Image (spheres, rainbow, N blue to C red):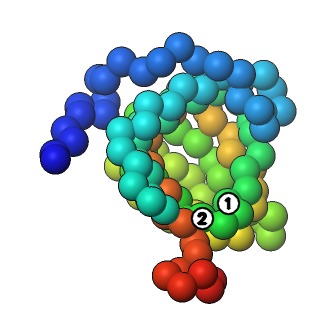
Amino acid sequence: MTHLTDAVSVSLPPAVPKPTSLTGQRESTLELWRDGGAETGVWECEPGTFTAVRDGFHEICQILTGRATLTTEDGEVTELVPGSTVVLPDGWKGTWVVHETMRKTYVMIDAVAPGGTR
């Protein structure tokens, strides 16, 4: 079965408080597909700051709208703008500062390899 969505204009569910927000942001997620250890969808978040940890999965994001600055625990800074693709591997920890409401597509893949090993 094919799953096709205009990720830039698709209506998302009502925004809810982001649990790891340091500034009271709200976010919305529309899951488009899930199968076993993989998931993809569209995510949107209001401006503000939140922490993130990728523990047990890898995330690949394509930024559609908005701007953000990512800072890793080690101080590496990455600027995200529309068209940016970013990979956050298993174990990534850091902070997102969303400067303009951001919308992205994402793919999350379980970090556990077949056979149960990492």
Vertical placement of 47 versus 115: above or below?
above
**Quarter occupied by residue 104:** top left
Residue density around tag 1, few if under 14, some if 14–19, many if 20 or more, within 10 Å = some
Residue 7, visible in the rendered structure: yes
At 72% from the left and 50% from the top, the residue drawn is 52
Where residue 3 appears, as percent x and y from the top left, is: 21, 42
Residue identifier under label 2: 57
At 65% from the left and 53% from the top, the residue drawn is 70
Question: Residue 54 shows which numbered tag?
Answer: 1
Mark 1 lies on a secondary structure that is loop
Residue toward you, 82 or 40? 40
Q: Quadrant where the C terminus lies?
A: bottom right
Asked whether the residues under the numbered discs 1 and 2 touch, taking CB atoms below 8 Å apart as contact, a structural biologist would say: yes
Q: Is residue 98 left or right of residue 29?
A: right
Question: Residue 87 shows which numbered tag?
Answer: none
Q: CA distance from mark 1 to mark 2?
A: 6 Å
Q: Amino acid at mark 2?
A: Phe
Where residue 87 appears, as percent x and y from the top left, is: 51, 64
At 75% from the left and 61% from the top, the residue drawn is 93
At 36% from the left and 39% from the top, the residue drawn is 32
Where residue 15 appears, as percent x and y from the top left, is: 58, 18
